[in-house]
């Protein structure tokens, strides 16, 4: 058996690699195990996020949005471009280069921090030992004072739509489509379905999104999700709600999808179909039968509020445990666990994890929705400000959407910030910073915001909470 480590991390996604770096910074002897082989047939760190998730999807969203603007709206500024074309393989290759740069960057950081990398499959054994099956099949057993399980998640498959990565794709396959499909079907109107659907709609695909639930973006504030439905539909996304996929049939290079909706059995034929119905935790061959770590009823590794599993000294973080499947949630859990192992009392504020959907306009929020607060019986005051009234948004020809600030009617404390609009993700983060420090709507309203900025919309929405907005007629103060 090799030397004992203070910390062994299984999985080098944004949860695992961040935990390993922070543990090493704190002076702990740390190892990380990763099995993923990237496109070039070499171990690639960074997990789903860097390889097949957050970053590659944003690369395609940015490329496709630039194309869309050049095609549809440069003329508004007086810019003539001639024929605008899109070379899809170049777009995909640019995305691959970004992935390569970033995963290489993580490898460099792991090394610079003195973390030992084991390339292969890790499995937790009893007594905090970890078995590593190397890429060459050789097995070694490592010992650790602490183990952090960060094995992440993978796409959910549904029996009616088996993925072949040719005609029926999961989110990974959808990042490598090499030509614009004439007709694209997307199953699932969640974050991933809407983002990937938007990429191809901008490039000219006729996109239909088939969603089983009757409600669109049920987790978002209802005012924002209604606005999002309107805006995305206007952009050409055909979003079918209350439509459950029951089967698919491939014929040649096309797929016919059967689904049931309020009108009964329906069929639609597509050139490509993306299955984006959620993700599930990766626990296969991760835990020996006698290691003592328990799963919860949904198959996630069971952990407490501090990511401790049922075995002392064994922790689990990120997508493999309860909570939002988001990279920033995984990373912060990684930091919390590394610091707690080092003896700090670090905690994480699970109430303030921002959510973002990178459509255009972006949809983002932090804290609670108006309907959730009302359901809890909390009386609220609400302020909204439309980007149509923002000088900066007008200058940028980007005026769809609004900012909504929700505050406790009794204390004025901000309980939710919800945005659909340009740079929504960045604006919501400002709300999150304020909320972390217990800001009131009045506090936000009293701050000086630069002019002209999109942030002024947040300022005005905060002022509107108490009926003081300057650049919009105020709703009566309740
Ligand atoms: P992962 O990133 O899944 O990493 C787990 C790692 O563990 C993998 O590299 C895997 O190979 C390795 N592993 C698993 N088992 C073993 C084992 N036994 N031995 C060795 N290695 C193992 N989140 C956001 O916050 N923002 C976004 O914009 C966003 N966009 C997304 C877009 C798409 C298309 C997808 C699919 C996801 C997106 N996500 C986004 C979600 C985000 O990618 C995940 O929440 C995040 O990657 C979870 O991090 P993690 O470290 O828990 O797991
Ligand atoms: P998310 O978990 O945010 O990625 O969203 C996945 C979406 O897919 C959810 O809104 C589900 O309701 C939806 N979904 C799951 N199964 C089906 C199905 N068979 N047909 C249509 N939509 C589905």
Image: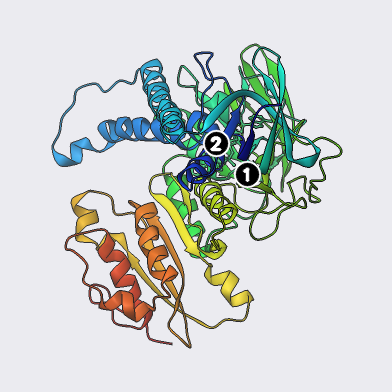
Q: Residue at x 32, y 74 (%)?
A: 444
Whole-angstrom CA distance, mark 1 to mark 2, is 10 Å
Q: Secondary structure at mark 2?
A: loop
Say which mark, if any, is on residue 319: 1
Q: Residue at x 29, y 70 (%)?
A: 459
Instruction: Determine if residue 405 is in view.
Output: yes
Report the mark closest to the observer, 1 or 2. 2
Q: Quadrant of the C terminus?
A: bottom left
Mark 2: few/some/many CA within 10 Å (<14, 14-19, 20+): many
- Ligand 2's image quarter is top right
Mark 1: few/some/many CA within 10 Å (<14, 14-19, 20+): many
In this view, the residue farthest toward the right is 290
In this view, the residue farthest toward the left is 78
Q: Nearer the viewer, residue 314 or 29?
A: 29
Q: Nearer the viewer, residue 191 or 12?
A: 12
- Residue 192 position, x and y percent, is 54, 40
Q: Residue at x 73, y 47 (%)?
A: 301
Give the residue pinned by disc 2: 13
Taking 109 as reference, is 389 above or below it?
Answer: below
- Residue 225 position, x and y percent, is 51, 57
Q: Are marks 1 and 2 in contact (CB under 8 Å)?
A: yes
With 98 as the anchor, is 114 left or right in this view? right
Does the closest atom of ligand 1 sit within 8 Å of the Cβ of label 2? yes
Taking 456 as reference, is 34 above or below it?
Answer: above
With 40 as the anchor, is 398 left or right in this view? left
The mark tally for this picture is 2
Does the closest atom of ligand 1 sit within 8 Å of the Cβ of label 1? yes
Instruction: Determine if residue 463 is in view.
Output: no
First reached walking from the N terminus: tag 1 or tag 2: 2
With 379 as the anchor, is 199 left or right in this view? left
- Residue 266 position, x and y percent, is 70, 35
Quadrant in the rendering for residue 477: bottom left
């Amino acid at each position: 058996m090799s030397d004992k480590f203070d910390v062994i991390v299984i999985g080098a996604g944004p949860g695992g690699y961040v935990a390993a770096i922070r543990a090493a910074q704190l002076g702990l002897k740390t190892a990380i195990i990763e099995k993923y082989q990237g496109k070039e047939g070499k171990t690639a760190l960074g997990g789903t996020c860097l390889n097949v998730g957050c970053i590659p999807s944003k690369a395609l969203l940015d490329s496709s949005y630039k194309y869309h603007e050049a095609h549809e709206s440069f003329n508004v500024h007086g810019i003539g471009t001639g024929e605008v074309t899109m070379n899809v393989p170049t777009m995909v290759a640019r995305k691959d280069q970004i992935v390569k740069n970033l995963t290489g960057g993580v490898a460099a950081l792991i090394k610079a921090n003195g973390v030992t990398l084991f390339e292969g499959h890790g499995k937790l054994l009893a007594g905090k030992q970890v078995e590593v099956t190397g890429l060459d099949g050789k097995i070694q057993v490592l010992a650790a004072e602490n183990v952090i399980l960060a094995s992440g998640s993978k796409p959910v498959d549904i029996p009616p739509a088996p993925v072949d990565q040719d005609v029926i794709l999961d989110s990974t396959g959808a990042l490598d489509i090499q030509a614009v499909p004439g007709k694209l079907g997307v199953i699932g109107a969640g974050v991933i379905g809407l983002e990937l659907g938007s990429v191809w709609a901008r490039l000219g695909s006729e996109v239909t999104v088939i969603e089983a639930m009757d409600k669109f973006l049920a987790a978002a504030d209802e005012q924002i999700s209604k606005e999002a439905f309107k805006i995305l539909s206007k952009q050409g996304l055909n979003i079918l709600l209350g439509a459950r996929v029951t089967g698919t049939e491939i014929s040649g290079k096309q797929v016919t999808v059967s689904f049931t909706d309020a009108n009964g059995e329906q069929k639609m034929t597509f050139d490509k179909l993306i299955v984006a119905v959620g993700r599930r935790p990766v626990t296969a061959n991760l835990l020996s039968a006698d290691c003592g770590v328990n799963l919860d009823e949904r198959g996630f590794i069971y952990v407490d509020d501090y990511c401790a599993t049922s075995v002392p000294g064994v922790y689990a973080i990120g997508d493999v445990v309860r909570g939002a499947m988001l990279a920033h949630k995984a990373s912060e859990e990684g930091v919390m666990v590394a610091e707690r192992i080092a003896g700090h009392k670090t905690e994480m504020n699970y109430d303030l994890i921002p959510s973002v959907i990178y459509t255009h306009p972006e949809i983002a929020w932090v804290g609670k929705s108006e309907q959730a607060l009302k359901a809890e019986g909390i009386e609220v005051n609400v302020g909204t400000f439309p980007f149509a009234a923002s000088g900066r948004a007008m200058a940028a020809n980007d005026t769809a959407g609004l900012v909504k600030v929700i505050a406790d009617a009794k204390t004025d404390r901000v309980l939710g910030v919800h945005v659909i609009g340009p740079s929504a993700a960045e604006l919501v983060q400002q709300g999150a910073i304020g909320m972390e420090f217990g800001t009131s709507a009045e506090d936000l309203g009293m701050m000086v915001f630069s002019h002209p900025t999109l942030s002024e919309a947040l300022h005005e929405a905060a002022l509107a909470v108490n009926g003081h907005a300057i650049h919009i007629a105020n709703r009566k103060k309740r």
